[in-house]
Amino acid sequence: MKKTGIPGIFVFLLIVVVLIVACMQVQEPDSGNIVIKYKFYGGFVMPTYALQELVVTKETSTFTITAADGNITEHFEKNLTPEQFNSIVKVFIDNNFASYGDRYDEARNYVTDAGFTDITFTANGKTKTVTTYNINNYLPSGLIAIREKLQETVEYTKSLDESQIKALAESWIREAPIYTYDGSGLVLVNYVQQESFPVRHVLTYNFTSSHAGYGDRSGKVTAMVITNHTITITVIDGNVDSAIIDGVWDETGQFMIGSEQSLSYQPKMCEKTPWQIWEENSGRVYIRAPTDEEIIKHYYASVYSIDVRNAKKIQLGTVSCQACDVCPETYRFGLAVNASEMQPLLDEGWVRTG
């Protein structure tokens, strides 16, 4: 009987090792049939944002927001380059998504009302879904990397491309008071995407008015003269953040830049103003109690770095029904502020009077 020599045994073992390694190799998914879904729901959100879902295929990513009543409130769609799609798939493969459990929600014991996310990866006829609590705490690092990549894809899908940004800016200008009154000949002259966060898109246009002045001049006596204008639009997160005409007129706020604006505020019975609440929580001690006017000035200087002027309390000589926050007080406050700085005051209930 012929004995097997050492070389024969070595060859046999080598074949066995090769077979084992081949069996252990993970089958690469066919990119053509991959579908990735990222759905988040529950938690403390507005009813209009009840269900949000990202769907990624080889060529597109879509993001849909559905209200609690089942109506779609927002829908976004973007084409994906092969590189973008492969980078999304790669994060699933690199972090061995198939190895994770079906549910990770330990964080709900420590943080309430965050809601849940379902991460689903479908390829080669097989589907794997992992449900997580909608925060990264207590999650495996690989799942965190996957969630971060999917969230990055959501932001990309929601963002506007250059043509959409231009369309948004031009639509806004055509509906603005100055253009609807007598504007014509809108032409784009420059577009810049600034490297900032959030990204700022700055677009400059030229157009012509048939009358002098700015804004809506209905009911005003204006010179009938052809006037060329330049308007600079800044778009941030899909919204027009500012619109400046000829460097002197704010079309969003309807005021001359650098001008002084008069504002008025009338409190309601039994209701504290923002500056009164701030003062009560300031912990400051005085030899003499400050007046309302002094508190207003200190409040806007400290909280917003805004210099308000001529703050005053004006008695109206009216009678109140004493029905607390239903009825206004018998006095109001007035002040003057640089028009470019007045937005925080408007947000707190001040109204323009000049």
Image (cartoon, rainbow, N blue to C red):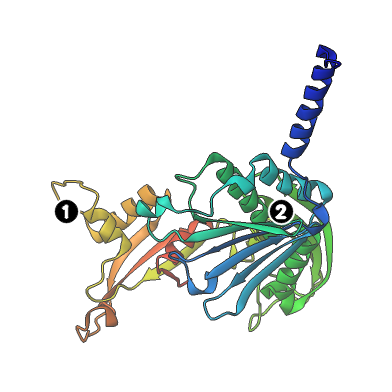
Q: Amino acid at mark 1?
A: Ala
**Occupied quadrant, residue 80:** bottom right
Helix, strand or loop at label 2? It is: strand
Residue 95's disc is: none
The reply to whether residue 339 is visible in this rendering is no
Residue 15: x %, y % from top left: 82, 27
Q: Residue furthest top?
A: 6
- Residue 274 vs residue 171: left or right? left
How far apart in space, not on screen, are marks 1 and 2 (Cα)? 48 Å
> 101 or 309: which is nearer to us?
101
Q: Residue furthest left?
A: 287
The reply to whether residue 90 is visible in this rendering is yes
- Residue 222 vs residue 258: left or right? right
Q: Few, some or many C-alpha atoms within 10 Å of disc 1 (few <14, some 14-19, many ≥20)?
A: few
Residue 84: x %, y % from top left: 77, 48
- Residue 133 vs residue 329: left or right? right
> Which residue is drawn at the image coordinates 32% and 51% (left, top)?
298
Residue 102: x %, y % from top left: 54, 54
Helix, strand or loop at label 1? It is: loop
Residue 289's disc is: 1
> In the image, which is nearer the foreground, mark 1 or mark 2?
2
Read off the residue under disc 2: 201
Q: Amino acid at mark 2?
A: His
First of labels 1, 2 by sequence position: 2
- Residue 153 vs residue 271: left or right? right
> Which residue is drawn at the image coordinates 41% and 68% (left, top)?
350
1 and 2 marks in contact (CB < 8 Å): no
Q: Is residue 4 above or below residue 330?
A: above
> Which residue is drawn at the image coordinates 25% and 60% (left, top)?
292
Query: Quadrant of the image for the N terminus?
Result: top right
> Which residue is drawn at the image coordinates 83% and 49% (left, top)?
82
